[in-house]
Image (cartoon, rainbow, N blue to C red):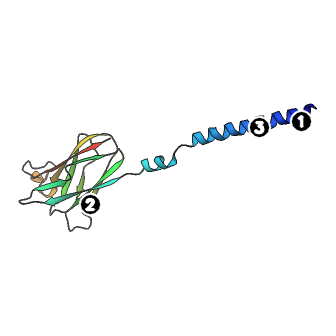
Amino acid sequence: MFKPFFRRQISVMMLMVLMVLTFTLAACGGDTTSAASSGSAQTVTITETTGGNDVYAFAPTTLAIKAGDSVKWVNNSDENHKLVISPNGPTATTVTKSGSNDNTGTVTFSTAGTYTVTSQLVDRLKDGQHTPDPADSKATITITVS
């Protein structure tokens, strides 16, 4: 007489426990798509173009990216350019001139902030030193990293 009653109660309790467990596991799963996409770095191309009398420019002149994204420079000019990133940005890189084996350079911005990237003409460094000649024609871009 008591056995069927207890069996039914145990069955109902087991069903409730399974339902709670199912909902708990479903809630903990989260969205795997957004986690996977946040880890990939975006590459944006900025092209330097040759103007008259060695005037160089970046296009665009401002850029907004996320921390961890990369910026890819494509150098379509006839000069090698050193990209100097300030303040306290990623290490400077040199982008070789158009017609060379690889006229691109990529820099990854890991930390949020606003950076100014200035292009200095490598072939015209003053007295062969690593300081730029103030007379150099410089291209500048502002990159905001969030």
Q: Earlier in the sequence, mark 1 or mark 3?
A: 1
Q: Position of residue 74 (x, y in %)?
A: 24, 60
Q: Secondary structure at mark 1?
A: helix
Residue 30 percent location from the top left of the image: 54, 43
Q: What is the quadrant of the N terminus in the image?
A: top right
- Give the alpha-carbon distance from disc 3 to disc 2, as whole Å: 63 Å
* Badge 3 amino acid: Met
Is tag 3's residue or tag 2's residue first in the polypeptide sequence? 3
Q: Residue at x 75, y 39 (%)?
A: 15
Residue at the spot of label 1 = 4
Residue 103 percent coordinates (x, y): 24, 63
Task: Write the residue at 72% across / 36% down.
Answer: 17
| Viewer-proximal residue among 127 and 39 | 39
Q: Residue at x 18, y 54 (%)?
A: 58
- Amino acid at the residue labelled 1: Pro
* Residue at (17, 51) in percent of width and height: 119
